[in-house]
Image (cartoon, rainbow, N blue to C red):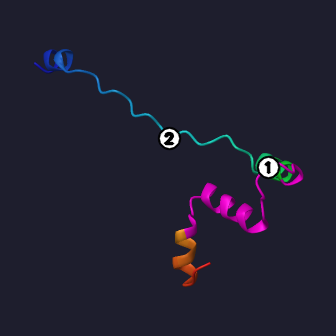
Amino acid sequence: MRAETNKTMAKAKPRKKKQKSLINSEEILARARAVRQTPKGIELTDRLLQSLKRELDGMTTDDLREKQGRSF
């Protein structure tokens, strides 16, 4: 009996694993420094760079404000 039920059951599809991004922090810093040197690029301040780093690490600006108990 068991062999018959195993044949009729559909195989479960494997779950897709979340892929980690292959972004290197040094590449991000190099790109940010390049933007700073470009006069037509966005103005990348230290504050904005830190904000972008936090977002990449999973902490948003709103989370940081709640943690610190103040607004920017």
Question: Residues in magenta?
Answer: 36-61
Disc 1 on helix, strand or loop? loop
The residue lying furthest to the front in this view is 40
Classify residue 41 as left or right of residue 12: right
Q: How many marks?
A: 2
Is 55 covered by the magenta stretch?
yes
Left or right of 4 on screen, residue 65: right
Q: Looking at the rendering, which quadrant does residue 3 occupy?
A: top left
Q: Is residue 35 magenta?
A: no
Which circle marks residue 18 in the picture?
Answer: 2
Of residue 59 and residue 20, the one placed in the foreground of this image is 59
Q: List the single residue furthest toward the left.
A: 1
Q: Is residue 70 above or below residue 16?
A: below
Residue in the picture at 38% in, 30% down: 14
Type of amino acid at the residue the image marks with label 1: Gly
Residue lying furthest right in this view? 37
Q: Which residue is at 78% across, 64% downward?
A: 45
Q: Which residue is mark 1?
A: 41
Question: In the image, is 10 to the left or to the right of 19?
Answer: left
* Relative image position of residue 22 (x, y in whole percent): 67, 40
The quarter of the image holding the N terminus is: top left
Q: Quadrant of residue 65?
A: bottom right
Rendered-image quadrant of the C terminus: bottom right
In this rendering, would 61 be left or right of 14?
right
Compared with residue 18, is residue 66 higher up or lower down, i.e. above or below?
A: below
Give the residue type that dot 2 points to. Lys
Q: Residue at x 63, y 55 (%)?
A: 56
**Which sits earlier in the primary sequence, circle 1 or circle 2?**
2
Q: Badge 2 local density, few (<14 within 10 Å), some, or many (20+)? A: few
